[in-house]
Image (tube, rainbow, N blue to C red):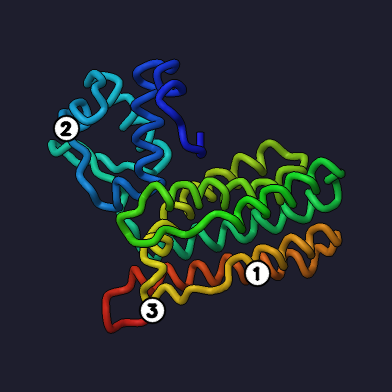
Amino acid sequence: MNGLLNTDDLESLSQAERAYRRLRGEILHGDLMPGERLRAADLQDRYSLGLTPIREALMRLASESLVEGETNRGARVTDASLDELADIMATRRAIERLCLTAAMARGGADWEAEIVASMHLLSRTPLPADPGDREAAARWEAQHRRFHLALVSACGSKWLLRFWATLADHSERYRKVRLLHHHEAEAEVRDINAEHAAIMAAVLDRDPVRATDLMDRHLTNTETSVARLLAPKGSKP
């Protein structure tokens, strides 16, 4: 659900599921930005799908807090806010620590191999050249998600992974702001590959203290960069 779907993948799904995945993907990948109005009739034309599946998709996305209903005005993409960003990232850091610690205790050779492979692919995936390069942003996000999922995948708890996936989805929506504006000074671009490589090394060394500390700093640095981009010009978040 979090990767990119090709045309054949979408055609094999029901109309409601196709509408849901298209809308969800465009919200997470930045094609539909926070606060943007979502008129069912416009989406019907855009996706060549019926009104009923579009409305079903909007209701489903509202249950995930990705869409908000507006009385007598349809719906809109949920707004971005500094308070929500802080809440999401604080919760994600807590869940990530639990998942990562458990994965290091349980993971085997296949788990290690997927971490190394996903890190290699991520390091070879370029960042978008400008805010209009949404395809490049989506490709980078897909590899970034694969790497972070690989780290926690051996935690042994389906519920922890569900919570992790929900938080990763919502933090991805915010991180898109930074990804598409990484050339701006407020984004404070770091050597992300070096951060990921350091986390990978600590995880493969089975060092939970070092690994969780590095992950905490990695997530906090991203939160700080996004907060600077979201804050009104001239103010400090």
The relative height of residue 80 versus residue 139 in the rendered view (above or below) is below
Q: Which residue is mark 3?
A: 185
Q: Secondary structure at mark 2?
A: helix
Tag 1 secondary structure: helix
Label 1 sits on residue: 194
How far is the residue under mark 3 from the one under mark 1? 20 Å
Q: Is residue 27 left or right of residue 144?
A: left
Q: How many marks?
A: 3
Kindly identify the residue that appears in the image at 65 percent across and 46 percent down: 149
Amino acid at pointer 3: Ala
Residue 151 percent across, percent down from the top left? 71, 51
Foreground pick, 80 / 182:
182
Residue 155, labelled with which disc?
none
Q: Earlier in the sequence, mark 1 or mark 2?
A: 2
Within 10 Å of the Cα at label 1, are there few (<14), some (14-19), or many (20+) other Cα atoms? few
Q: Residue 42 shows which numbered tag?
A: 2
